[in-house]
Image (cartoon, rainbow, N blue to C red):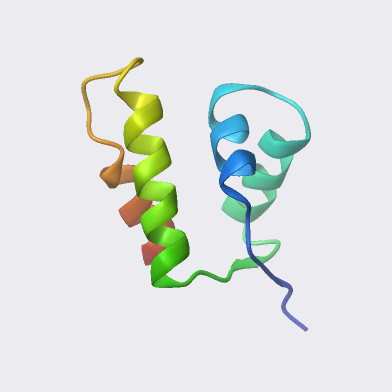
Amino acid sequence: MTIKAILDTNVIISGIFWKGAPFEILKAWQEHRFRLAITLPILNEYRRVLDETFQSFVAIPAYHFAESVYGN
């Protein structure tokens, strides 16, 4: 049986920038230990928050990350 999960935006942000439980959750997803369940409104929230967050850290638009999340 495949586990499906919806990740809160805070888990995504925290997992990208810091170690700890959110990082381990993203790592487990990357290792295909569960499938990410996502809807268009959730994806749009990921994009919005990541774009706002990344504006202060990097010049690359966060939608590249969001597209990779949506594509999996």
Relative vertical location of residue 25 with respect to residue 38 in this rendering, above or below: above
Residue 54: quarter of image: top left
Q: Residue at x 62, y 45 (%)?
A: 26
Q: Where residue 22 sits: x, y (%)?
A: 70, 38
Q: Residue furthest top?
A: 57
Rendering coords of residue 20 (x, y %): 76, 28
Q: Where is residue 71 in the image (x, y as percent from the top left)?
A: 37, 65
- Residue 33 in percent (x, y) is at 70, 61
Q: Is 24 situated left or right of 12 in this image?
A: right
Position of 38 relative to 61 (above/below): below
Q: Residue at 43% x, 52% y: name it.
A: 45
What residue do we see at 31% from left, 38% from top? 62
**Left or right: 3 with respect to 66?**
right
Q: Residue at x 46, y 72 (%)?
A: 39
Q: Which residue lies furthest to the bottom in this view?
A: 1
The C terminus lies in which quarter of the figure?
A: bottom left
Q: Quadrant of residue 70?
A: bottom left
**Quarter location, residue 69:** bottom left
Residue 12 shows in this picture:
yes
